[in-house]
Image (cartoon, helix red, strand yellow):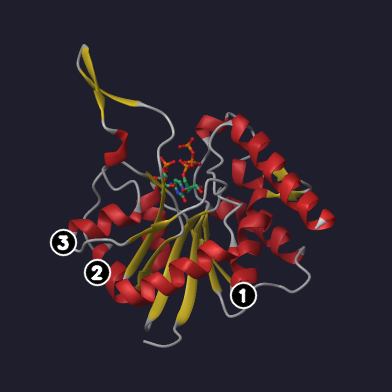
Amino acid sequence: MGDRKKIAIIVAGGSGTRMQSAVPKQFLDLAGKPVLHHTIAAFVQAYPDMEIVLVLPEMHFSHAESILQAFDTLPAVTMVRGGETRFHSVKNGLDTVSGDAVVFVHDGVRPLVSATLIHTCYEAALSHGSAIPVIDMKDSIREISGEKNMAVDRDRYKIIQTPQTFLSELILPAFALPYDPLFTDEATVVERLGQPVHLVAGEESNIKITKPLDLTVAAALLFKSVFYYFII
Ligand SMILES: Nc1ccn([C@@H]2O[C@H](COP(=O)(O)OP(=O)(O)OP(=O)(O)O)[C@@H](O)[C@H]2O)c(=O)n1
Ligand SMILES: C[C@](O)(CO)[C@H](O)COP(=O)(O)O
């Protein structure tokens, strides 16, 4: 299929209720830079021809603009208004996509995604139409049913990450479907159209900053990678 246009839809339209911070978590400081800076940098560093569509509430456009101005080279970014749910935010981002492209949909609050994972997703999407990063479960899990609970086989389950990556001809028709609260990620929407999705190995370090502890963990992981860079 050869080389394709690459578009990263970075969703940062949430309010971060679980983070319980006055500043939305996508703007919190992580090792001296806003979380969103790290996320955008990961995509522009992975592919120099990456086009970024940044989805966030209109009242945060000027804040995002100041984050972009801090880059040594201004990245190619289109800003788009966020929606009521993550699904609606992704849909608004997809409305800007035209022509054949590989579309990455990524949480703005997963700042530690590596260039290797972005490359893996691109190649797998070209070969299989989609690429959904997953990791194994580490804990035992139980299914709750009313007052009862029972153990389930964790090997039958995977933890899902982003960037969820698709050929544009697969994801665009899927997002014409009406909203369903079960649409917590893009794979679920594409699957509803009857299309199976292709899984790839995600990364333990590709955490989603959801609660305060996640920010501490992310800072430690960043510190560790910088430390290794200097001693090797
Ligand atoms: N209406 C929404 C809701 C979420 N997101 C984005 O989707 C990603 C994953 O969502 P989540 O971690 O749940 O973020 P929030 O919705 O901000 O957090 P919470 O659920 O705790 O309120 C985040 O980058 C968030 O900004 C979005 O773009 N638009
Ligand atoms: C897309 C996602 O990050 C995959 O794990 C996740 O589903 C987002 O869910 P949230 O409820 O919006 O945090």
Q: Earlier in the sequence, mark 1 or mark 3?
A: 1
- The residue identified by callout 2 is 173
Q: Earlier in the sequence, mark 3 or mark 2?
A: 2
Determine whether, in the image, residue 96 is placed left or right of residue 209: left
Residue 74 visible (yes or no): yes
State the CA–CA distance, disc 1 to disc 2.
25 Å
- The residue identified by callout 1 is 76
Determine whether, in the image, residue 128 is placed left or right of residue 23: left
Instruction: Name the one closer to the observer, 75 or 49.
Output: 49
| Mark 1 or mark 3, whichever is nearer to me | 3
Secondary element at tag 2: helix
State the CA–CA distance, disc 3 to disc 2.
12 Å
Circles 3, 2 touching at the beta carbon (< 8 Å): no
Vertical relation: 115 (above or below) 159: below
Q: Residues within 10 Å of mark 3 (few under 14, many from 20)?
A: few
Vertical relation: 213 (above or below) 66: above
Determine whether, in the image, residue 73 is placed left or right of residue 189: right
Question: Residue at position x 29%, y 48% from top?
Answer: 183
Query: Where residue 222 appears, x then y in whole percent?
Result: 71, 47
Residue type at mark 3: give it: Gly
Residue type at mark 1: give it: Ala
Which image quarter holds the N terminus? bottom left
Q: Earlier in the sequence, mark 1 or mark 2?
A: 1
Secondary element at tag 1: loop
State the CA–CA distance, disc 1 to disc 3.
34 Å
- What is the residue that sits farthest to the top in this orientation? 147
- The residue identified by callout 3 is 194
Question: Residue at position x 61%, y 75% from top?
Answer: 76
Instruction: Name the one closer to the observer, 60 or 130.
Output: 130
Query: Where residue 100 appears, x then y in whole percent?
Result: 37, 83
Residue type at mark 2: give it: Pro
